[in-house]
Amino acid sequence: MAGGADVPAAATPLPAATVLLLRPAEPQLQVLMVARHEQIDFASGALVFPGGKVDAADADPALVPHLRGADRMDAEVRALRVAAIREAFEECGVLLAREPGAGGTLPASRVRAFEACRAELASGRLTMLELAARERIELAIDLLTPFSHWVTPPFMPRRFDTWFFLARAPQDQVAIHDGGELVDSVWISPAAALEDLAEKRRTILFPTRLNLMMLDESRTDDEALAAARARPIKTVVPRIVERDGKRWLTIDSDAGYALTEVPASPRPGSPGSPGR
């Protein structure tokens, strides 16, 4: 445009996957959340769900024989689910996998046998294909239920196209955070996490807050999974609007969330980042 400043092109969102691991509890289900190290450049110090960007190796077609239900999914969907399983194992030591042809998930004793692989996966020295082939296991991508879909807004320098999945956590596997990027892990009810946010005991990003609110509508993991399967998923792209001299972070009113706007954060880079 003549006489105008060039507007930088929006960054391309990177495919990412996040998993909300659920376990039954009273009076409400609990979800596994992790706290990120204060020195990490993205979502530092925040309480988040395990997850991260999709790696090229997650989309390797050679993985298909090691994936239950892969014949019913396209390559993009498979890669997202592999990434969700990989990230949960890397970050928390929880592995959604099983013996080929078996039901359920691997027992904790079996997973502990290749606990050291977590660091190798995180560094890229090992891929999920190599792990699955070496250990003769099958990744249980069929146990992941789509929950929500968020895309970082165009004004952000780092953007993610993130799918959130629900899954029941294996009953006897113990979640242990990686001690690197993550400094804590906690099983917590959605209501308790939201109370911690309200009382300023924890930092929780906007997308995480809204997904906790949606999860808080269910008392049990069965209810949460049934609700997710029944609910149409609309892609959410937060935006900043100005009204009456104030800036608001907002989403579309038909996205399925009870809350649709909050005051925009004054901290650069924090509004709308959907990584977890």
Image (spheres, rainbow, N blue to C red):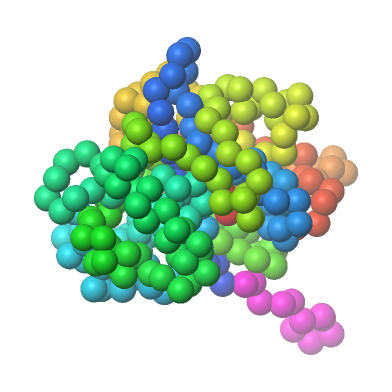
Q: Which percent across, then down, holds residue 205?
A: 66, 43
Q: Is residue 10 left or right of residue 248?
A: left
Name the quadrant of the N terminus.
bottom right
Q: Is residue 15 above or below residue 145?
A: below
Front-most of residues 125 and 140 = 125
Query: Residue 151 appears at what percent x and percent y?
Result: 54, 56
Q: Is residue 199 above or below residue 168?
A: above
Residue at 27% over, 54% down: 139
User: Residue 192: which quarter of the image?
Assistant: top right
For residue 268, which quarter of the picture? Answer: bottom right
Residue 114 lies in the magenta-colored region: no
Question: Could you say which quadrant of the image residue 194 lies in?
Answer: top right
Extent of the magenta region: 1-11
Residue lying farthest right?
A: 245
Q: Nearer the viewer, residue 1 or 46?
A: 46
Residue 87 point in image, percent of width and height? 46, 55
Q: Residue furthest top?
A: 27
Q: In the current view of this chain or complex, which residue is farthest to the left?
A: 101
Q: In this rendering, does residue 257 appear at all?
A: no
x then y, percent, for residue 62: 23, 73
Query: Magenta: predominant secondary structure element?
Result: loop
Residue 132 in sight:
yes
The vertical placement of 123 against 138, above or below, is: below
Q: Classify residue 216 as left or right of residue 209.
A: left
At 45% from the left and 14% from the top, the residue drawn is: 26
